[in-house]
Amino acid sequence: MAANDSPLAADCRVVSNGNAIPIGNPGPADANVEKMAKTVYSTLKSAGMSDVNIAGILGNWDQESGIDPTSVQHFPTRTYTMSPEKKSAAANTDNGIGLGQWTFGRNTLLRNYATAKGADWWDIKLQLTFMFDKNGDNASDVEVVQGMISTPQPTPRAAAKYFHDKWERSADSSTAQREANADKWFGIISGWSVDQSLVVSIDKGGDFIKDATKVISTFLSGNACQANASRVGSITPKSGGMTQEEAQKLVDLYNQEGDKWLDEKYGPTVVRAPAATTTRRTVCRSRTTS
């Protein structure tokens, strides 16, 4: 469980984000549904999402597709197989496809994303990657799910409604069934742990390049040439710029932060370019006024 999720087995309730939530009797889950749900759970949980929010997403997808990534609107769900008929129907953007039943422009985005990746659009790992990639789904929709990693909703029902209203945006007049599904899934996943073999690498948000650009801009402006003293010591602006030693400390910090960002985004096995080194004496100069 996440840091804000703790079990209270005595009364079959779970405390999440300060709220005691009864898990009830979830009942058994179909083996195929459970396998797909565990892939969703393991991926989102390993990214830091709370059980409450994961249950809210699963509650919606239970309603939308039966948590079947091969699902195509107007065809039976929970078949977990692709057919020529379903594949053909998926090309009609009026039809929802996949876990979240992506429709219209998002239908096209998912299928084009799969083609670019050399994968099938009905692959569950592809769909999970797509929904967290701003080069995949709409940027605003990606921000919704990335935000759900850091901000848990108070209850599974609240999470189901939030995900529906902000991400699914279906024509349903009521979210009652989705909310009931979320309660069910919360009870099921409360007994699960992350299966690393099912974890899909996703973009959890944050932009190191954008952040680095801001840092560089600050240094070039002369307003601050200060690094984390606990890691590399203090670096302050002064007339004539920085010494070689001070400049190397700054570069070392840049390399450290870059490695951290790459590890979080792609995992620790990514092959990196050689670390940067300094060759000039002056890299940061205080501005003077005449």
Image: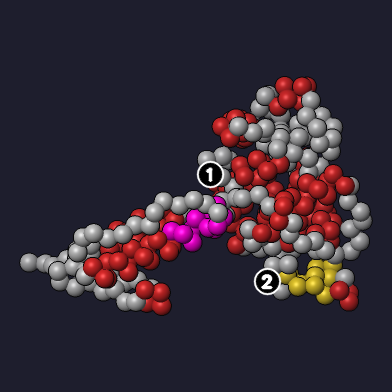
Q: Circle 2 sits in a helix, a strand or a loop, which is it?
A: loop
**Position in image of residue 282 (x %, y %):** 19, 63
The image quadrant that residue 2 belongs to is bottom right
Magenta highlight: main SS: helix
When the figure is inspected, residue 75 is found, relative to residue 163, above or below; the finding is: above
From the viewer's perspective, is residue 138 above or below residue 16?
A: above
Mark 2 is surrounded, within 10 Å at the Cα level, by few (under 14), some (14 to 19) or many (20 or more) other residues, namely few
Determine which residue is flagged by label 1.
134
Residue 6 place in picture, x, y as percent? 76, 73
Q: Nearer the viewer, residue 226 or 230?
A: 230
Mark toward the start of the polypeptide (2 vs 1): 2
Disc 1 residue crowd, few under 14, some 14–19, many 20+, Cα 10 Å:
some
| Segment tinted magenta in the rendering | 258-268
Q: Is residue 262 magenta?
A: yes
Numbered label attached to residue 3: 2
- From the viewer's perspective, is residue 91 above or below residue 42? above
Q: In the rendered structure, which amino acid carries the disc numbered 1?
A: Lys
Q: Residue 127 appears at what percent x and percent y?
A: 66, 41
Q: Amino acid at mark 2?
A: Ala
SS at badge 1: loop
Q: Can residue 278 be seen in this snapshot?
A: yes
Tell me if label 2 and label 1 are in contact, CB under 8 Å: no
The percent coordinates of residue 200 (x first, y second) are: 66, 49
- Tag shown at residue 193: none
- Work out how far the residue at label 2 is from the one at label 1, CA to CA, in angstroms: 28 Å
Q: How is the image coloured?
A: secondary structure
